[in-house]
Image (cartoon, rainbow, N blue to C red):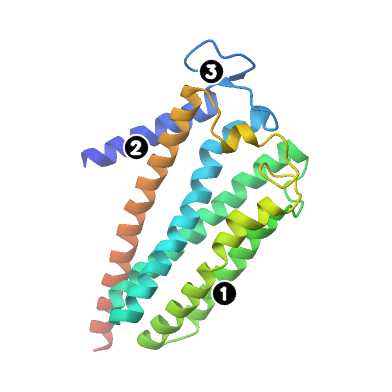
Amino acid sequence: MAWKIFLFLLLAFVSVAGIAFPIVPVPTKWYEFPFIPGLKENAKIIFFHVPTAWLSVVAFFMSTIYSFKYLRKKNLDDDAKSYAAAQLGIIFCILATITGAVWAKFAWGSFWSWDPRQTSIFALLLIYGAWFALRSSIESEEKRATLSSVYAIIAFLTVPFFVFIMPRIMKGLHPGSADDTNSGPVIDFKMNANMELIFFLSLIGFTILYFWMWNIGYKSIIYRDKINKQYRG
């Protein structure tokens, strides 16, 4: 129970600090963040956008790991863990898309402009959306788990390309694109100590939240399947 209180306080502090702390050209107080070229006031979105994007990758990676484990051991619990991770992956991917679109509205004047980064995350949503459609179309547990595991492994092969490679080798509006000259301070973490602290606390807090949600999610899937089997039996 104590860690849940800690998590609540941590996320509350990160949220308040990330929204309320001002960005100034030359920080002189502990609660002030530095002006970052290319991001300006919009830099505050990194406290929420980056963690959600990061957890999308973590979730899809975990889904792949447990897909491998299922194919090796044929334990349906591993399929449940893979499924729960993928569910959260989609949720955080959608949140990353929404927070990115909000930032784009203020930075580029439009919520959506088919920037390589936006296009890549949209492609991931389609790929994993198809994975859920596949699962829902198969009734046999073993067949569903096997085909889903194979699909999850193949799908994750696209994640490094769409997340880390494509947006950086193509010209675009998003910081870190091939023609971006202002992305260095963000990518190299050249923020002041206060901003860096809030950033990493945000990553830690959202990561703990993810694993808590994943733990609840896969257990609920296992319990649901057991109840369904008893009901059918």
The amino acid sitting under disc 1 is: Ala
Locate the C terminus by quadrant. bottom left
Do callouts 3 and 1 mark residues in contact (Cβ within 8 Å)?
Answer: no
Residue 117 in view, yes or no = no
Q: What residue appears at the point 65 percent right and 61 percent down from the top-left corner?
A: 122
Q: CA distance from mark 1 to mark 2?
A: 34 Å
Front residue of 12 and 201:
201
Tell me the tag on residue 8: 2
Q: Please state the horizontal and vertical placement of residue 226, each as a whole percent of the image.
A: 25, 77
Residue matched to label 1? 130
Graded by Cα atoms within 10 Å as few (under 14), some (14 to 19) or many (20 or more), the crowding at tag 3 reads some
Q: Residues within 10 Å of mark 2 (few under 14, many from 20)?
A: some
Residue 99 versus residue 166: which sits nearer the camera?
166
Residue under pointer 3: 32
Foreground mark, 2 or 3, reads 3
Image position of 210 with respect to 122: above or below = above
The mark nearer the N terminus, 1 or 2, is 2
Q: Of marks 2 and 3, which one's residue comes earlier in the chain? A: 2
- Local SS, label 2: helix
Q: Amino acid at mark 3?
A: Glu
Q: Describe residue 91's horizontal placement relative to residue 118 as left or right.
A: left
Residue 2: horizontal and vertical position, in percent?
Answer: 22, 38
Q: Is residue 46 above or below residue 83?
A: above
Task: Tell me the residue at 34%/53% (across/down).
Answer: 211
Q: Nearer the viewer, mark 1 or mark 2?
A: 1
In the image, is 38 to the left or to the right of 130? right
Label 3 residue SS? loop
Q: Earlier in the sequence, mark 3 or mark 1?
A: 3
Relative horizontal placement of residue 126, taking residue 227 as reference (left or right): right
Question: What residue occupies the far top of the structure in this picture?
Answer: 28
Residue drawn at x 36%, y 86% is 142
